[in-house]
Image (tube, rainbow, N blue to C red):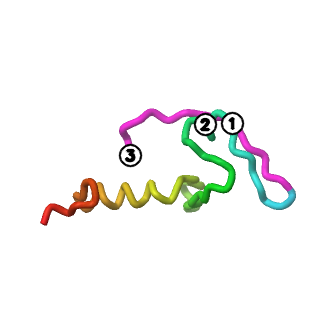
Amino acid sequence: MLGRSKNRVFGTAKVGDRGQIVIPQEARRFFGISPGDTLLILGNEASGLVVTKPEILNNLADEILGKEDGHDGH
């Protein structure tokens, strides 16, 4: 997952008065983001923000723990 694909620049997003941003259309299509979807916002001072779908962390946790298709190998 991490490090397996190249980074892409999808454009910029301006922060509105209410703190909202618009995710560029190409990025929404590429990542399958639809109106009403919930996105996870992570970050730190050094690296900035990461916006992702919550299930990405579930998949990453499964990969780290060696689980595949819901089975833990026991």
Q: Amino acid at mark 3?
A: Leu
Residue farthest toward the bottom in the current orientation of the protein:
74
Q: Residue at the location (36% across, 38% down)?
A: 4
**Answer yes or no: do the residues labelled 3 and 2 have beta carbons within 8 Å?**
no
Q: Which residue is mark 1?
A: 25
Residue sitting at x 37%, y 41%: 3
Q: Position of residue 68 (x, y in %)?
A: 25, 54
Callout 2 amino acid: Arg
Magenta segment, prevailing SS (helix, strand or loop): loop
The N terminus: image quadrant:
top left
Q: Are marks 1 and 2 in contact (CB under 8 Å)?
A: yes
First in sequence: mark 3 or mark 2? 3
* Residue 21, horizontal then vertical, whole percent: 75, 51
Q: Is the residue 20 above or below the residue 33 in the image?
A: below
SS of the residue under disc 2: helix
Residue 54 vertical position relative to residue 35 in the rendered view, above or below:
below
* Residue indicated by mark 2: 29
Neighbour tally class for label 1: few under 14, some 14-19, many 20 plus, Cα within 10 Å = few
Which residue range is magenta in the image? 1-16
Q: Residues within 10 Å of mark 3 (few under 14, many from 20)?
A: few
Residue indicated by mark 3: 2
CA gap between label 1 and label 2 equals 6 Å
Q: Nearer the viewer, residue 13 or 57?
A: 57
Total of numbered circles in the picture?
Answer: 3
Amino acid on which disc 1 is placed: Gln
Q: Magenta includes 15?
A: yes
Dot 2 alpha-carbon crowd within 10 angstroms: few under 14, some 14 to 19, many 20 or more: few
